[in-house]
Image (cartoon, rainbow, N blue to C red):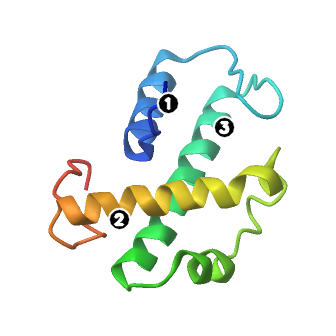
């Protein structure tokens, strides 16, 4: 059975809902348990939005994934747990996700018609 692709737009929105629940701790897939949950949620949302913005810019400008990835300054996130093992794959999946959204939106990567949050 194939796994479903992660939808980063929905992930960022879901994190808003988690934040409203005010959990006492967060157990991420990678890294340590967080007791500063607002900080952990904000960091994850910021990362998702950063990757989406960089990959959307590349898609909008017809830049290849390899060039977009290499020219992005990942310094803020380089010390995340499993960064070296996962970031390129994360960025590539987001790139493909935004390409798909762009096709559905008629070619506008920055303002896809499927995005009600902008």
Residue 67: give x, y in percent of width and height.
60, 84
- As helix, strand or loop, the secondary structure at mark 1 comes to loop
Q: Quadrant of residue 70?
A: bottom right
Q: Is 85 rendered above or below residue 30?
A: below
Considering only order in the chain, which callout, 1 or 3, is on the residue closer to the N terminus?
1
Residue at the (76%, 26%) spot, across then down: 34
Closer to us: 85 or 32: 85
Residue 101: give x, y in percent of width and height.
28, 58
Q: Quadrant of residue 97?
A: bottom left
Q: Which mark is residue 3?
A: 1
Viewed as shown, does residue 1 lie left or right of 86? Answer: left
Q: Which mark is residue 99?
A: 2
How much space separates mark 1 and mark 2, taking CA atoms?
Answer: 20 Å
- Residue located beneath label 3 in the image: 39
Neighbourhood count class around disc 2 (C-alpha, 10 Å): few under 14, some 14–19, many 20 upward: many
How much space separates mark 3 and mark 1, taking CA atoms?
Answer: 29 Å
Q: Is 82 rendered above or below residue 84?
A: above
Closer to us: 27 or 93: 93
């Amino acid at each position: 059975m194939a796994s479903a692709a992660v939808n980063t737009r929905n992930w960022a929105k879901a994190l808003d809902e988690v934040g409203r629940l005010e959990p006492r701790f967060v157990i991420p897939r990678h890294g340590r348990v967080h007791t500063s949950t607002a900080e952990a949620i904000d960091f994850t949302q910021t990362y998702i939005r950063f990757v989406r913005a960089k990959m959307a810019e590349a898609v909008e400008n017809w830049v290849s994934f390899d060039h977009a990835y290499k020219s992005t300054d990942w310094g803020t996130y380089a010390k995340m747990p499993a960064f070296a093992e996962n970031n390129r794959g994360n960025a590539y999946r987001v790139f493909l996700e935004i390409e798909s959204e762009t096709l559905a939106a008629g070619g506008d990567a920055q303002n896809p018609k499927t995005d009600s949050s902008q």
